[in-house]
Amino acid sequence: MARTSAGEKSPAAAASRGAGPDILRVAAIAVAAAVAGLAAGLVLGGAAAEQVVPGLSDAGTVTRWGLPLSRMAMNLAAAVTVGALIAAAALLPLEGGGTGSGRAAGGRTAAPSLGADAIGYARAASWTAAAWAAAAAATLIFTIADVLGQPVSQVIADSKLSSYAGQISQGTALMLVILLAVVVALLARTTTTPAATFGLLALAGIALLPPPLTGHSASAANHSVAVTGVALHVLAVAPWVGGLAAVGAHALARRDRLEVMSARFSRMALWCYVIVGASGLVNVIARLPDPAELLSTDYGRLALGKIVAFAILGWFGWWHRERTLPALADRRPGAFARLATVEIAIMAATVGLAVALARTAPPEPTTEESAVKSLIGYDMPPALTPGRLAALGQFDFFFAALVVALGGLYLAGLVRLRRRGDRWSPGRTAAWYLGLATILVVTQTGIATYSPILFSVHMVQHMVLNMLTPILLVLGAPVTLALRALKPAAVRGDRGPREWLTAALHSRAAAIIAHPAVATVLFVAGTFVLYFTPLFEAAMRNHLGHIAMSAHFLLAGSLFFWVLIGVDPAPRKLPYPGRILLLFVTMPFHAFFGIALMNLGQPLARGWYTAVDPPWGASTLSDQHTGGAIAWGFGEIPTFIVLIALAFQWYFDDQRQARRLDRQADRAERRRAGRPAGAGEPAAEDDELAVYNARLAKLAERDERNRGS
């Protein structure tokens, strides 16, 4: 590409500078739409004119409006930060890796790096993350003023921020957001690699979650469903809104590769739209079990407004895919920029409406909530029987969504292989879906209903997720299927899903985590650390903690059995005798854990099990002894399955090695038949088996001479 002289401006740079006012104008329109949506929601929902109860202090009008405005600014800055990082890491093609000019010293291929536009978006993310942190700090101040019922000036003057910020859940959540946003702002100033940008994107994704998870979802009647629903909702909205803002800015700046960027965003936006719709529906049902409340309550009417806006945005997405993307392919970006401007304004107004909805109290439950229901999300179930254990299910949105996603992705891989004419082992498919079925059994049936109440049932759930499900999932070889089904990146040197997966498998982090010692420690020590520390009771008291605990069981088990019997490629492969030795060294620790539970003198998590103690059950200590017996006896099942799998894998591996050596020997024979070997010349020196046999013959000949002398 020709370079411009020092005094000459490139057309792209000139266009970018000329598009600055356009971007500012669209940003101003979006902010105005967001403020309008927020104001309308606060007025219609009644939060703008809250009645002050006599005798109770009031934070004042400044806090009443300042809190939702600062929260809206925080949400918009967060979405733009996430969108800028996605644009830098995924929407724009990478540079360097695999290209003809991307050669490092010594002829090696240079690692992919961010292009100039991508680095620009990373730097923009630094500024928006700083704005995110500032808006979160303002939200923290207004939140404390709102909780204390005091004006902001008094809260600041009395230095109550430091004393109250860590004592309320919203304050702790906002302090975490400030910390993470500042880290993103600092690191985004210098990052130039795609892996580092994805790391910042993951950090930003984590920072999205604390505020919404401490709002209405944590106190909803169906809080186990609401918490998962709001988490998925936020994680899908931010890349959707922020990604559109990044693509719109790219179009207004008239930069190159807009058609690539918009096509990638369109595919991502479709999945975001589906997740936002499903999670939003779940959230509405969790808070408004009666559909009539959509029209009869302020909360329901605002939720209905969000549903209408969601449908309108869906139409915009369809129009983009049908009309504006083909226009971009014909080098006509104007239509896309105009439509994206309107869509961004509607999205911003919806964000403002969502903040107003969060400030509006949902309808009070019509029936009085029991103490047990406030803890576990449902009333005390009847006495445990085998039939109720199988039929009295409890919907867990997180694991249901996980199973649907994993099952759908695996099926998509199978379909792609079949269309291409490739074969895939039916045994691997059966193992994968049987593993997913075991997740459903322990998270959606009566096992999930009784596990928060009875430790013995909880231990069944733990053992299945930690020691049975991972074996089946690992034998399903999902990574191998993905590597075979995913297509290489369309742009040479770029990274698509297949390239990112390969890079992750060869990364230093994967080499450390997949080390047999690390996998074994996580598999064994995690259980002891969880149950014999206060972590267990803390996890039982919080639905997110319970999800994290179950996810740890599943991930730690999958990592360990990947090392033992994994079919997928791994950074380090143990020889089969080493795998068997590791199995027999590790499994007794679970037996020791079960014996330790069977000999407890005091119950674990006494406070929790006292609060949810069923009137029809045995004593807590006796039930935990039963749980210990389950843990002790269950270990035989995975040991038996793993031994069978190892025996088959070892046998088939030997068969493959024998066939490979036979093929090498045949090639060596054909070469000898075509070219006689000279005296003392080993036949087919490039053949591994021939060289090995020649070396053995020389050693035997030398030993014979030594004996003769």
Image (cartoon, rainbow, N blue to C red):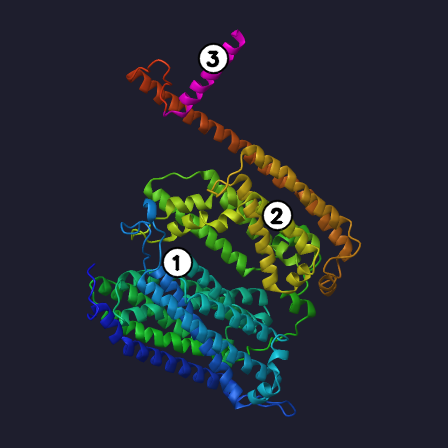
Above-or-below relation of 180 to 60: above
Q: Which amino acid, mark 2?
A: Val
Alpha carbons under labels 2 and 3: distance apart: 50 Å
Q: Is residue 670 visible?
A: yes
Q: Can you identify the residue that label 3 sits on?
A: 701
Q: Give the percent coordinates (x, y) of residue 386.
A: 67, 50
Alpha carbons under labels 1 and 3: distance apart: 58 Å
Front position among marks 2 and 3: 3
Label whose residue precedes the other's in the sequence (2 or 3): 2
Above-or-below relation of 157 to 9: below
Q: Which mark is residue 193?
A: 1
Which of the pair 319/628 is nearer the observer?
A: 628
Q: Secondary structure at mark 2?
A: helix
Above-or-below relation of 31 to 533: below
Label whose residue precedes the other's in the sequence (1 or 3): 1
Q: Which mark is residue 521?
A: 2
Q: Which mark is residue 621?
A: none
Instruction: Identify the residue shown where x is 53% and y is 37%.
Output: 574
Quadrant for the N terminus, please: bottom left
Label whose residue precedes the other's in the sequence (2 or 1): 1
Q: Give the percent coordinates (x, y) of residue 381.
A: 67, 61
Q: Which amino acid, mark 1?
A: Thr
Q: Residue furthest right?
A: 601
Which of the pair 4/586 is nearer the observer?
A: 4
Task: Look at the image and give the residue range highlighted in magenta.
Answer: 686-709
In the image: residue 687, left or right of residue 448? left
Q: Give the percent coordinates (x, y) of residue 480.
A: 43, 43
